[in-house]
Amino acid sequence: MLHCILTIYRKETALGFFKGLSFPLATITFYNSVVFGFFSNSQRLISQYRYGDAWHPCGMLDLTVASMLTGLVSVGIGSPVDLVKIRLQMQTQAVLSENLHLAGSISNANIPLRSVEIPGQRLYRGPIHCISTILQTEGLQGLYRGAGAMMLRDIPGYTLYFIPYTILCDLLKPDASSSPHPGSIWLAGGLAGSLSWVTATPADVVKSRMQADTQLQRKYKGILHCIIHSYKTEGVQIFFRGTSVNAIRGFPMCATMFLTYELSLQFFRGFQDKDIFVVKE
């Protein structure tokens, strides 16, 4: 991890750490709104169906179903966003050139045109150009390359995200009838996030490799081929590469998201209660 940080800084300066940031930054609000909103509404629908009361507390099975459905839905939005982010972040690699002015020297050297590389040349000018290029070269399905691996990551990942959070919040509450303290929410969210990301790392490695696999340099035929090829060439440890980074990143990111979500709900519910009181008056 330290070697990676130093290498990126030396070759690309501090800006290298923020490569591919703009598109996730522009979509993260919408993405998290869908994820948390779908999870909450799924719980209410399940409670309404099973108990006849939308506000009935969910059991462990109910939470598991709601979490798994949330993970499935998140792939529809998150897969294109992750794909664009990874393609932009991989632009330190050499890019294949198809410039016509190279045709003479290439044919004389008996080298296929598509195999000539121009180090330092960028394939994508930004997120919009990246999306349009993928649509032109790979079609709509190109934006969802690696979506299958993302399902393998997010369906169990969100289950190990929401359930530990719920359990930890219940354990940290002073009593069953009170709401958890903001500090408890922050701690529960951070621990749940770290646990979720650590366990999701193997599937995340496969997903990232599939998404970084461009059409011009296609290496993997599918998820299973990616898993087998990675295992044969780099061993089982490759599926746990980046675990420490995911654990470190997961805590503050998820702690902040859960705390913001819970405080926002309390804030808007307070306004709703005030409006109801005014109407009654």
Image: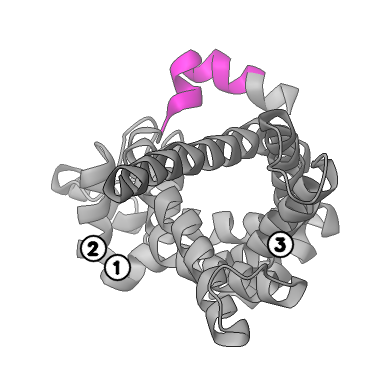
Q: Is residue 214 visible?
A: no
Residue type indicated by callout 1: Glu
**Element type at mark 2:** helix
Q: Give the residue pinned by disc 1.
A: 138
Residue at 34% over, 59% down:
112
Distance from the alpha carbon under mark 3 to that under mark 1: 24 Å
Q: Are marks 3 and 1 in contact (CB under 8 Å)?
A: no
Q: Secondary structure at mark 3?
A: helix
The image shows residue 96, relative to residue 45, as above or below, that is above
Up-down relation of residue 19 to residue 83 (above or below):
above
Q: Nearer the viewer, residue 152 or 210?
A: 152
Tag 1 near tag 2, CB within 8 Å: yes
For mark 2, what is the residue?
135
State left or right for residue 57 relative to residue 27. right
The label on residue 230 is 3
Mark 2 is surrounded, within 10 Å at the Cα level, by few (under 14), some (14 to 19) or many (20 or more) other residues, namely: some
Q: Quadrant of residue 26?
A: top left
- Using a 10 Å C-alpha cutoff, classify the residue at mark 3 as few (fewer than 14 neighbours), some (14 to 19) or many (20 or more): some
Q: Position of residue 27 (x, y in %)?
A: 34, 45
Relative placement, left or right, of 16 versus 182 is left
Quarter of the picture containing the N terminus is top right
Mark 3 belongs to which amino acid? Ser
Across and down, in percent, residue 250 comes to: 67, 39
Using residue 245 as the reference point, say whether residue 220 is left or right of it.
left
Magenta span: 6-19
Q: Residue at x 26, y 37 (%)?
A: 126
Give amino acid for label 2. Leu
**In whole angstroms, how far apart are the C-alphas of marks 2 and 3?**
27 Å
Marks 3 and 1, the one that precedes in the sequence: 1
Which sits earlier in the primary sequence, circle 2 or circle 3?
2
Q: Is residue 16 magenta?
A: yes
